[in-house]
Image (spheres, helix red, strand yellow):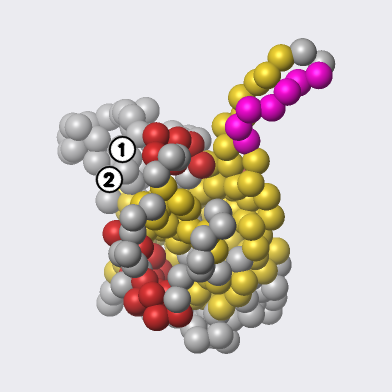
Amino acid sequence: MRRLSSVQALTAAVFIVVLLASPAAAAMRDGWLGDMAVVAWLEDSTVKVALANGGTSRLTVTLTSEGWDQRWRPFFLDRTLVVPARTVVIEAFNLNSTWRGEPVAVKVSAWDREAVVEVQTQEIFSPSSYVVRSQEELQVFVDLAFLAPERETVTLVVDDVYRGLGQSDVGEITVKSVEGGFYFSPARQRVEWIDPYMILTMQAPRPQREVTTFSFSVYKVPEDARGRYSDQEIEGPTILVFSRQLAYQDNSHLSSPPTPAWDWRR
């Protein structure tokens, strides 16, 4: 892990404990349906879902909303589709007009199994993409505004590496820049404020089984902390990585109009 101040790094033992207890690892496992990995994220009022089938057989799945508005109406309508073998498919769902920022999840169901995937938002972490090919570079913008109320008493620690589900799905995380705060604007002849942010870079792994997911975390560490970093863990985004041998099919431009705010039970 890497602190954003001049203090000693975590010991290897502490790092291992944090890794094994990490909620991010559990979230990655939840996003699998057999050989198919699933991630979902929010863009404005559109939910995008990536389904990467690394197997040799096509898979028919149904995507349904696990979120409901105050009148018990789903945030989007169900959709059934076929994901071809060795293919990544991107689908998009426009949320209905009654959505007011509530948490949303997507249930992915096949005939013999199902998975529930949380829809990721960009309140703190904004990756350049949630879906990348093997060995591609990924940048993650981190909004540091959440540290502002505690900036005098808290240090931010960043994982040294990201980790995926496979043993070889490991890669170095580089802190490319940390910016923000007060600065002098010569053009305006005044001191201005830029919200603080950090940019992380990493290279996607080469999946052993065509498809993998990975994530990382950052930690708010009080000045008097004695190793309980997991209590302050902030999970990073879950990223889907697919082999260059897989086909890529983006259907997001075919998304249907926003789901109407009707009473679907009638």
The image's mark for residue 102 is 1
Residue occupied by mark 2? 67
Q: Nearer the viewer, residue 201 or 145?
A: 145
Q: Position of residue 254 (x, y in %)?
A: 57, 46
Residue 181 sits inside the magenta stretch: yes
The image's mark for residue 190 is none
Q: Position of residue 228 (x, y in %)?
A: 31, 64
Q: Is residue 74 above or below residue 175?
A: above
Name which residue lies at 33% across and 46% down: 104
Q: Position of residue 266 (x, y in %)?
A: 17, 35
Name which residue lies at 48% across and 44% down: 124
Outermost residue toward the right? Answer: 187
Majority secondary structure of the magenta segment?
strand
Three-letter amino acid code of the residue under disc 2? Gly
Three-letter amino acid code of the residue under disc 1? Glu
Name which residue lies at 38% across and 65% down: 24
The kind of secondary structure element at disc 2 is loop
Q: Nearer the viewer, residue 135 or 184?
A: 184
The image quadrant of residue 28 is bottom left
Q: Are marks 1 and 2 in contact (CB under 8 Å)?
A: yes
Q: Is residue 146 visible?
A: no
Q: Is residue 66 above or below residue 143?
A: below
Q: Nearer the viewer, residue 255 or 215?
A: 215
Q: Residues within 10 Å of mark 1 (few under 14, many from 20)?
A: few
Name which residue lies at 39% across and 39% down: 150
Q: Is residue 167 visible?
A: yes
Q: Is residue 107 left or right of residue 243?
A: left
The image quadrant of residue 168 is bottom right
